[in-house]
Amino acid sequence: MKKIRTITLRGVKYKVLWFKDPDKLIDFDGRCNKQDKIIEIRCGLSARDTNVVLIHEIFHAFFWDLDESVVVDTAIDLERVLNQLNK
């Protein structure tokens, strides 16, 4: 899977950083820092999980006020729809 380095969301450029954690010491697969305009994604996830995590963090960048469960469910649903388009 290609590792993107930047994305632009609503006219704002975010850096995308990919981190390794072979010992699983970090308890998240991704996070969005809106103040610093950085999205971090764990390396080594499956293509599907990487897509879900990236979608999830993009939703956080767009909609900071959404409940976490809404972001989780919406990211999974959107990844599923996009995956169906690619079949």
Image (cartoon, rainbow, N blue to C red):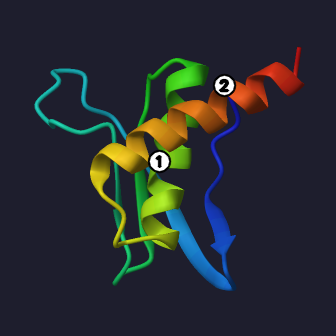
Marked residue nearer the N-terminal end (2 or 1) = 1
Q: Nearer the viewer, residue 67 or 4?
A: 67
**Is 49 above or below relative to 75?**
above
Residue that label 2 marks: 80
The picture places residue 46, in percent across and down from the top left corner, at 52, 17
Task: Decide: few, some or many residues near mark 1? Use Cα within 10 Å; few <14, some 14-19, many ≥20.
Answer: many
Quadrant, the C terminus: top right
Q: Quadrant of the N terminus?
A: top right
Residue 56 pos. (x, y %): 47, 48
- For the residue pair 29 and 60, the one nearer the viewer reads as 60
Return the residue nearer the eye: 82 or 17: 82
For image coordinates 59% across by 32% down, the residue present is 77
Q: Residue furthest left?
A: 25
Classify mark 2: helix, strand or loop: helix
Task: Please tell me whether mark 1 sits on a helix, a strand or a loop.
Answer: helix
Q: Is residue 44 left or right of residue 9?
A: left
Marks 2 & 1, CB-CB < 8 Å contact: no
Query: CA gap, disc 2 to disc 1?
Result: 13 Å
Q: Which residue is mark 1?
A: 56
